[in-house]
Amino acid sequence: MRPAPFDYVAPTTIEEVVALLAEHGEDAKIVAGGQSLIPMMALRLARPAVLVDIGGVDSLQHVGPGSIGAGVTQATLEREAPHPLLAEVLPLIAHPAIRNRGTIGGSIAHADPAAELPAVALLCDAELVARGPAGERVIAAVDFFESYLTTALAPDEVLTEIRFPTHHRTGFAFREVSRRHGDFALVGAGARVTVDRAGDVVDQRLVFIGVGSTPVIAEDASELEPSDDVHATAAYRKHVAGVLARDVLLTARSRA
Ligand SMILES: Cc1cc2nc3c(=O)[nH]c(=O)nc-3n(C[C@H](O)[C@H](O)[C@H](O)COP(=O)(O)OP(=O)(O)OC[C@H]3O[C@@H](n4cnc5c(N)ncnc54)[C@H](O)[C@@H]3O)c2cc1C
C-alpha cells in the first residue's frame, strides 16, 4: 500500500524542529531513518499529515564515549563503537541497508519491545535528553519505556542525545535468539556486572527483550511473563531467556 498524503519539511536546526512540532501538534511526526515509520505509514498504521525530517540537523550527529546524538545512524555506531556494548549489539540489528539509515534515536523513540537499543539504554543507565517548547529535560532510561511503542516523550518533544555514564570495573554482554540473522529477536538478554577490587560482584542488572510490552529489567528469567504469539510460545521464550541470562551474566562478569 502507499502512505496517505503528507507534507514534508526538512529543518536544519533543533529550534526549527521544536517550532514545527509545536505548530502542527499531533498531526506532525518526526522521521529519522524512516525504517520503522515509513513501513507503518505504508500500512496506514500511521497517518501523519506532516513529516518533520531531522536528518539534516547537524547538532544530532555527534558521537563520543559519553554522548551520542539521536540522529547518528546505526551503521556509524557499528563502525565507531563508542561503547563496548554497542559494538556487540549493532551487528544483531536488522541488515546493513537498514542500519545505514536507521538511527539510535529512532530505535529508542520507537520503543519496539524486541529492539536491542532500548535494552542497551537500560543496561547502561543511559540518560535520554529531550527538547520541547519548555526547553530541555533529561529522562532516565528506566523511566522512558512506558508500554508497547510508547515512551515518556511528549508529541512535541524531540529526542536529541543519549548520554552514557561511565561504569568502572564493569562488564557488559548481550545475546539473542532469532529465526534468521537480522530478524527481530524472539528473545534477547543483556547483562551488566560490576565487581570490586577483589573480583566479587557488587552490582548486576539483567534486561530482556521480546518478553513483554517493553524491554524488561528482572532479577532472573523466572520473573518474566511473556505471551504466546505466532513466532514462539511463552514457555519457549521463558526457557530461552533463562539460558541466555546465565550466559550473559557469566560473560559480563568475565569482562568486568
Ligand atoms: C526489515 C527490518 C528489520 C528490522 N530489524 C530490526 C532488529 O532486528 N532490531 C531492531 O532494533 N530494529 C530493527 N528494525 C528497525 C530499525 O532498527 C529502525 O531503524 C529503528 O527502529 C527506527 O529508527 P529510524 O531512525 O529508522 O526511525 P524512524 O522510522 O524514522 O522513526 C521511528 C519512530 O521514532 C520517532 N522518532 C525518530 N527519531 C526521533 C527523535 N529523535 N525524537 C523523537 N522521536 C523520534 C518517529 O517519529 C517514529 O515514531 C528493522 C527494520 C526493518 C525495516
Image (tube, rainbow, N blue to C red):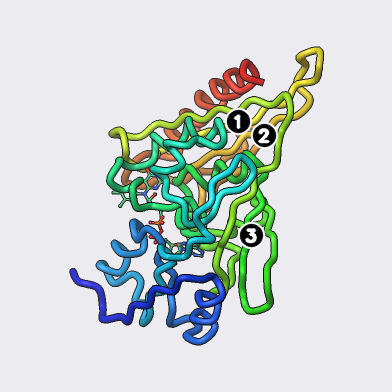
According to the image, label 2 marks what residue? 205
Which quadrant of the figure contains the N terminus? Answer: bottom left
Residue plotted at (67% across, 56% down): 143
As drawn, which residue projects farthest toward the left?
Answer: 1
Q: Mark 3: which secondary structure?
A: strand
Q: Is residue 112 visible?
A: no
Q: Amino acid type of disc 3?
A: Val
Mark 3 = which residue?
129
- Disc 2 packing (10 Å; few <14; some 14–19; many ≥20): some
Does 57 appear above or below 191?
below
Query: Which mark sits nearer the N-terminus, 3 or 2?
Result: 3
Tag 1 near tag 2, CB within 8 Å:
yes
Residue that extends furthest to the right in the rendered view of this protein: 197
Measuring from the top left, give residue 4's x and y in whole percent: 26, 78
- Report, in whole angstroms, how far the alpha carbon at label 1 lies from the one at label 3: 24 Å
In the rendering, at what x and y percent does residue 118 appear? 53, 48
The residue carrying mark 1 is 191
In three-dimensional space, the C-alpha distance between marks 1 and 2, rounded to whole angstroms, equals: 6 Å
* Local crowd size for mark 3, using a 10 Å CA cut-off: few (<14), some (14–19), many (≥20): many
